[in-house]
């Protein structure tokens, strides 16, 4: 096995060699602008493969993953050593372009026309300051600079025009071992690539949807032009022109952001071998959202999972396989359903529901985790680390979601979700619960007796709680179903007390 693996690793040295290079369609380049990937016209720097992966390269990576997975262990197995030896760039023979250099990751930052680019709060001339603060690793105030930058360029998941221009710098910083908190750089790249993950979970991301939206918008150019031309005066005409320009900028930003981060994925995959479990898990999270790279990401994730020592990070890898949606990974995912590690059982059950599997074992695991989630850590980044919320989402995809047992588990999660750590469990689980139990918008008021047994059970739960403790979404669900939303009235409605008492 050693001989075959060594030979395979030698052949792979050119396969995974990556370089951070610019992709400028036209125009001259100069000095620092060329090094940073910026052309004279301010075009976007891109992170790209030095040489494309061929079919034989992909087969080679699959065979490597098989070797990495075939010898179990935690940190000392053949697979683990081989995986780190080449993909981490620890072999002296790896091309220099894939290794970290002494060059400042922010070289060329001032060559970008930030003042001409938009983010959520106006023009983006403050972005360089946030990037430099991220590089320095220090901040003032409540939030780290990565969160402050995210608030500006991907505010509430909306990818701005300026966001794509930060990608080359964030990639370089993520790959620079001299910097601290690099998992935050990768997390920001995830947000730039897809926006907020709760918009897509428990399913994966399909970039074809956003590309189709952009194509449709461009196809409506004549209709927009007619609407602009029909404006009754110059002021409204300018407003309509601005609306059209902004709509196009926004739609283009979504696609350009995704594509820029997608092209960086091969370079960032090396971080699966970082010494930081948070950075490893965020890298697995990143790989989850780019199905077009699945042919290379899946074998790397399998090798990563097989030897990962952090339960949360390994579970993130399993979830990532599920989100990529390749049916051939189901046997690998299923093997963790009976793991002694709760995080891995949860991840396996979650991922299997993506493939329509809702066996009793899957339902059991999800139900148990909703009520008793693992300890929250930074090594499971999906949905702000909410095991319960994700389990509820996955369970909602099955026919067992509205059974009394499943609803009871969600109510336990909602009741126990206290403190900062429990906020996301409570928020996301409650959202799933009320969407499932009170769907739609019935036309007529419902008497308590008209409600289903599960609905009555939830109403009794709320009536027995202080109104201030009601979870998010409760009032909206009751209002839609024309059920009393005042606590005192709800207690009468549920038969807890007589009217007037």
Image (tube, helix red, strand yellow):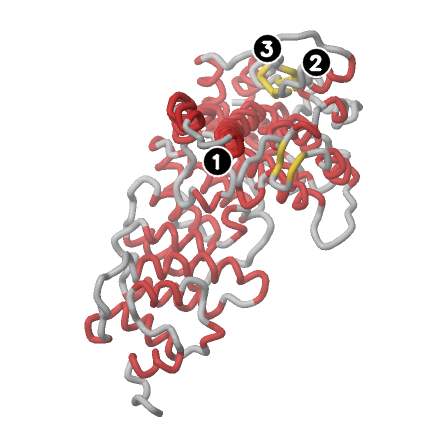
State the mark number for residue 328: none
Residue 269: x and y, percent?
58, 29
Q: Which residue ends up furthest to the bottom in the rendered image?
A: 501
179 to 21, vertically: above or below: below
Nearer the observer, disc 1 or disc 2? 2
Please report the residue visible at 64 percent of the width from the left and 20 percent of the height from the top.
Answer: 45
Spatial distance from mark 1 to mark 3, Cα to Cα? Answer: 30 Å
In the current view of this chain or complex, which residue is farthest to the left? 450
The answer to whether residue 247 shows anywhere in this view is no
Q: Residue at x 57, y 61 (%)?
A: 421
Q: Residues within 10 Å of mark 3 (few under 14, many from 20)?
A: few
Q: Please tell me whether mark 1 or mark 3 is closer to you in this view.
A: 3
Mark 2 residue crowding within 10 angstroms, few (<14) / some (14–19) / many (20+): some
Q: Secondary structure at mark 1?
A: loop
Q: Can you say whether 250 is above or below 14 in the image?
A: below
Q: Earlier in the sequence, mark 3 or mark 2?
A: 3
Sequence-wise, the earlier of marks 1 and 2 is 2
Q: Name which of mark 1 and mark 3 comes first in the sequence.
A: 3
Tell how many labels: 3
Q: Quadrant of the C terminus?
A: bottom left
Label 1 to label 2: alpha-carbon separation: 35 Å
Q: Is residue 324 visible?
A: yes
The picture places residue 420, in percent across and down from the top left corner, at 59, 62
Q: Nearer the viewer, residue 6 or 316?
A: 316
Q: What residue is pinned by disc 3?
A: 25
Could you tell me residue 312's position as x and y percent? Answer: 54, 48
Q: Which residue is mark 1?
A: 288
| Residue 40 numbered tag | 2
Q: CA distance from mark 3 to mark 2?
A: 11 Å
Mark 3: secondary structure? loop
């Amino acid at each position: 096995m050693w001989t075959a693996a060594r030979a395979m690793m030698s052949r792979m040295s050119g396969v995974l060699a990556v370089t951070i290079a610019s992709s400028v369609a036209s125009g001259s380049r100069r000095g620092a602008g060329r090094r940073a990937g910026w052309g004279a016209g301010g075009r976007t720097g891109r992170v790209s493969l030095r040489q494309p992966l061929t079919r034989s390269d992909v087969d080679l990576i699959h065979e490597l993953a098989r070797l990495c997975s075939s010898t179990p262990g935690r940190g000392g197995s053949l697979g683990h050593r081989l995986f780190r030896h080449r993909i981490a760039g620890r072999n002296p023979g790896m091309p220099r372009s894939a290794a970290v250099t002494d060059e400042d990751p922010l070289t060329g930052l001032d060559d970008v026309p930030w003042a001409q680019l938009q983010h959520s709060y106006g023009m983006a001339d403050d972005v360089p300051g946030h990037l430099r603060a991220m590089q320095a690793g220090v901040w003032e105030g409540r939030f780290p600079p990565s969160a402050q930058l995210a608030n500006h360029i991907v505010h509430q998941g909306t990818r701005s025009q300026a966001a794509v221009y930060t990608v080359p710098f964030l990639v370089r910083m993520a790959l620079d071992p001299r910097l601290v908190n690099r998992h935050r750089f990768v997390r920001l790249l995830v947000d730039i690539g897809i926006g907020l993950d709760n918009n897509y979970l428990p399913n994966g991301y399909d970039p074809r949807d956003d590309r189709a939206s952009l194509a449709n918008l461009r196809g409506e150019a004549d209709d927009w032009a007619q609407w602009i031309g029909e404006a009754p005066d110059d002021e409204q005409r300018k407003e309509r022109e601005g609306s059209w320009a902004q709509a196009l900028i926004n739609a283009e930003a979504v696609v350009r952001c995704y594509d820029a981060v997608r092209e960086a994925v091969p370079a960032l995959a090396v971080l699966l071998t970082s010494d930081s479990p948070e950075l490893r898990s965020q890298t697995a999270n990143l790989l989850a959202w780019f199905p077009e790279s699945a042919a290379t990401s899946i074998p790397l994730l399998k090798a990563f999972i097989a030897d990962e020592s952090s339960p949360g990070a390994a579970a993130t890898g399993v979830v990532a396989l599920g989100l990529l949606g390749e049916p051939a990974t189901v046997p690998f995912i299923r093997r963790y359903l009976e793991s002694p590690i709760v995080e891995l059982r949860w991840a396996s059950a979650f991922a299997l529901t993506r493939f329509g599997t809702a066996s009793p074992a899957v339902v059991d695991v999800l139900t148990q985790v909703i009520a008793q989630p693992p300890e929250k850590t930074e090594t499971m980044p999906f949905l702000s680390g909410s095991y319960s919320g994700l389990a509820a989402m996955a369970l909602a995809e099955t026919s067992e979601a509205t059974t009394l047992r499943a609803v009871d588990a969600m109510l336990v999660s909602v009741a126990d979700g206290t403190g900062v750590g429990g906020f996301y469990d409570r928020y996301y689980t409650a959202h799933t619960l009320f969407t499932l139990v009170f769907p739609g918008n019935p036309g007529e008021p419902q008497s308590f007796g008209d409600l289903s047994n599960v609905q009555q059970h939830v109403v009794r739960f709320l009536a027995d709680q202080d109104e201030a403790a009601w979870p998010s979404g409760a009032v909206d669900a009751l209002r839609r179903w024309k059920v009393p939303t005042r606590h005192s009235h709800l207690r009468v409605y549920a038969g807890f007390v007589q009217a007037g008492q």
